[in-house]
Image: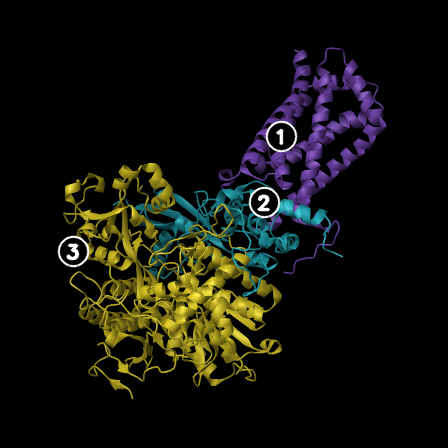
Chain colours: A yellow, B purple, C cyan
Amino acid sequence: MAEILTAPAPTTTISWREGAPIENNKCPTGELEKRWTRHKDSLRLVAPHNKRKLEVIVVGAGLAGASAAATLGELGYQVKVFVYHNSPRRAHSIAAQGGINAAKNYRNDGDSIWRLFYDTIKGGDFRARESNVYRLAEVSVKIIDHCVAQGIPFAREYGGYLDTRSFGGAQLMRTFYARGQTGQQLLLGAYTALQRQVAQGNVQVYYNYEVVDIVVEEGRVRGIIVRNLITGELHRVAGHAVVLGTGGYGNAYYLSTNAKLSNATAIWRAHRRGAYFANPSFVQIHPTCIPQSGEYQSKLTLMSESLRNDGRVWVPRTPGDKRRPQDIPESERWYYLEEWYPSFGNLVPRDIASRAAKRVCDMGYGVGPTGRAVYLDFSDAIKRLGREVIYQRYGNLFEMYEEITGESPWETPMRIYPAVHYTMGGLWVDYNLMTNIEGLYAIGEANFSDHGANRLGASALMQGLADGYFILPYTIGDYLATQLFVKLSTDTAAFADAEKDTQKRIERILSTKGTHTVDEFHRELGKILWDHCGLARNAQGLTQAYHQIHELQERFWKEVLVPGTGQEFNQNLEKALRVADFLELAKLMVVDAYHREESCGCHLREEHQTEEGEALRNDEKYAYVAAWEWAGEKEPPTLHKEPLKFEFVKPTVRSYK
Amino acid sequence: MEAKTVSPPVGWLHTTVGRKVVMALTGLFLITFLVVHLAGNLLLLRDDGGAAFNAYAEFMSTNPFIRVLEILLFAGFVVHIYQGLYFIFRERRGRPKGYARNDASANTNIFSRTMRISALVILIFLIVHLRHFFVEHRFLGSPLTMYESCKLAFENPWYSGFYVVSMVLLAFHLAHGFYSSFQTLGLIVNRRIERVIQWAGAAFAFLVPLGFAIIPLYFLLQTF
Amino acid sequence: MSKPMRFTLKIWRQKNAQEPGHFETYEIDGISPDASFLEMLDVLNEKLIKEGKDPVAFDHDCREGICGSCGMFINGRAHGPLPNITTCRLYMRHFRDGETIVIEPFRAKPFPVIKDLVVDRSALDRIIQTGGYISVNAGSAPDANAIPIPKPVADRAFDYATCIGCGACVAACKNASAMLFTAAKVSHLALLPQGQPERRERVKKMVAQMDAEGFGHCSNTGACAVECPAKIPLTAIAQLQRDFIWANLTPDPYVR
């Protein structure tokens, strides 16, 4: 069945095998509007007295994990939650700013489930499943109801009713928000719901535990191996089902807007145990972030995209111009966005703006100490509208910028640069959110399911909570109903193997005692991915990246320097284990980007674009989900294609003109 | 770490929040007493050889209503001091190991930081004060009138000095205590009320101890 | 661009919860004034690792001031010398070149040290467990607009709901009181109509748990609000006091 497409060669060339296509994704058929309801009605149920006998492991307590664990607890399952944080409230969902979409149509502006569905599928450049996306739009309505009942202080109008605002990719005002901290408020809602279940004894939360392996027996999940981060001990945990809500892998790029601890270990280990990894190269890059100011920089901070409404983007016409920006005369400024895209100007979509910034910096026009930034200038807007108006609109953002950079946007233009923000790719799941490993589920950013090749703003929170509160709790019962008489045991060969594997990995990392710190490798990996598998990709660059990552990986295992032992609180060991997995994942990202010879959404292959730099999708050849199977360390991965059928919407060209 | 269930109806007074309420209520009660006491004391400044003051002292020590209040007042002191001592001894419990460097002046005012010291000085003052005037006259049958007692004491620069210093510390105590009581009773519901209470507290903390301190100084200055 | 800076760091080192700790002094050079405090510690750790020494353990995650992980006591103050800020949002330009910086863990009995600057703050979660929520199961909620909530009420509730659970209030308080943390949650829910059914019980249980964990008493010094990165106002504490007194002094009208 498996056939090698490219010539068999050393492991440093990009190659893959093509496996059987995925036939059954469990998506229901028939009328789109009735699919989820009908599907729910067809799922098996577990009686209340039996639910108590079933143990579910939830990994991660972000929006998806916490909401799923709380809801499973409410239903009466025995739930164990594992978090590597010192509290479930610290998950990175907390940092989401903008808002959450829902097809409530409170504005009376013609919103509907269909429209939210359509916007999402189009925003994803027609690389997501119709059934999943429609369901997401459908349950979005209930999320807002539930969150309000939990006491989440959403923004309101003076009449006391909920306020909404508009957001990118939609012509409707359907985004609910709680100042600039919507993610925080929603997460705290899920977190407190989780704590309530803890108090009731349905859920146990294990703090400071990191999942280091997934235990699979004959295609069925049996449990996980966790490492107690305080003592370093490894534990075997058995469960009737395992739910991964471990977020995305944007940190593979080292610098991103993700939290520092966010990592891919749980999903990558699941992948190595047989779970398919879908569309790994689909990574969203956000155009307006505060740029890197030096080598020491550890992360990038997002600035609201709304700034581009009034700011003008430019670079000096002379590369390397060292004058202060305010001293550069108008005639020597290059407003490249206005020049390249006269009709949209500074308001071109996210991906175009991001790519253009990279292009001018590559050409040597970048500004700031690193030369990797462009100016976002408000002086015209201040002159035109006055300080007061600009303060009303952007005051808090200006303050945040000044706090971080020490420069006042009132006096000197802001410096901005794109940064990795979100990963649309993730573990492949069927309509029930189950991976191809029986009983192993992936929810939230950890799965690939709903955003196709590009995610719309305010949709990540929607998806996380939809999965956790209103989808997984139904679909998991269908599987658990078959597990009632399964006795849990950690005393099996599969558990012993997994534990031993981890033990070996840890020992190997600790005994290497090389010359370079983990961060040095991570920074290097980030740079390779950013340069070649970031905003724009091409075959040559990807091939080069693959070689470089391979080399880096070999050096990592020879030269990494991790102090301390495995029997203590050792943050560098944690980091090393995560980076080791990022190195492997990065190769798969590159393979995926290389194999997809089209441009779609975030994925711009330079070979496949119009003369103006627009993405050229190839629906004939690439209208599928690329689900990759791990074939071993020395073997190229196997590609399983899940064809995407569009029965209700017609894929069109996304035009910016 | 199971939470103890609080047994009704007074169990809640044993929580840290309940104790705080007791502290605030007794504190406010003592604050009202200070006003009454000061009003009486100011009679000492009348140039009538102590006639008015003595009459007032006589009234205060014989009127049955005042005698009942006196017991209440005494109880107020005892409870306030008891809770205060409880908190002082409890203070370290929340943080057995302190900071090597603690820049408390950056986030608190000097009055709240010195509550323990001011409390201690006021307690010593109270004991000396009661011994000198209250016990001497009520129980030991002093041959002097109250006015003579005061005059004698205040003409002593040591006693007057001690008195004035104590009043400064009383001012410190009130500067935080006044505001704190209102906060503890949950009465400071917004910024505006907070400002009003802070102003009122500052004025009270300045004027009342000043009023008390003027009296010994008045007597002392007359000796020169 | 700007001149690199030099610092002397006095950092609390403690191997684990059992062993006693001590201060170590480190010299560090070439720090950009635009580096964050945590990035300065990253640089120190890289250096320590290369010298074969044990790097300093500290909590951190989002590095944009919202996750509440990065608690440490810097030069005598929770989260360092600026008010209302987290350590990750503190930049080296706020220090003098050549300055000696003393770094200690948050200290409180309920916050035992795990290693170096890392402390266990799960006591705060246990306070929430006793009542910091509205008991509603997924699926049972009415339409979101069924209960209008006046905008000022929602805004005020938000002011309290914005707590990031970092524990700076406890660290800054001279009594190590968790009052501002507890009050923020009590006040958030007390203001909303959804929070009313459990309001009396919530405040009683949360106060009881706060005491059981061993946090100190509140003496209204206000240090917490000065250091709180979420700017939770002291009116939260007044609200808790009010609710607590009311819940204990007034008879529960629903008890038979």
Q: Give the Cα separation between the discs numbered 3 and 2.
A: 57 Å
**Toward the viewer: A387 or B8?**
A387
Residue drawn 63% across and 41% down? B184
* Residue marked by disc 1: B169
Residue drawn 85% across and 24% down? B141
> Residue A363 bears which disc, if any?
3
- Where in the figure is residue A518, as x and y percent of width and height? 33, 64
**Toward the viewer: C232 or A82?**
C232
In the picture, residue A245 is in which quadrant?
Answer: bottom left
Q: Give the Cα separation between the discs numbered 1 and 2.
A: 27 Å
Q: Secondary structure at mark 3?
A: loop
Q: Are marks 1 and 2 in contact (CB under 8 Å)?
A: no
Numbered disc in front, either 3 or 1: 3
Q: Give the Cα separation between the discs numbered 3 and 1.
A: 71 Å
Describe residue A203's horizontal placement relative to residue B124 as left or right. Answer: left
Q: Amino acid at mark 1?
A: Leu
Give the crowd class for mark 1: few <14, some 14-19, many >=20 residues within 10 Å.
many
**Toward the viewer: A133 or A509?**
A133
- Where in the figure is residue A498, as x and y percent of width and height? 43, 79
- Where in the figure is residue C142, as x and y percent of width and height? 55, 60
Label 2 is found on which chain of the structure? C
Q: Are marks 1 and 2 on the same chain?
A: no
Q: Secondary structure at mark 2?
A: helix
Q: Amino acid at mark 2?
A: Ile
Q: Secondary structure at mark 1?
A: helix
In the picture, residue A101 is in which quadrant?
Answer: bottom left
* Residue marked by disc 2: C237
> In the rendered image, is residue C40 in sight?
yes
Give the crowd class for mark 2: few <14, some 14-19, many >=20 residues within 10 Å.
many
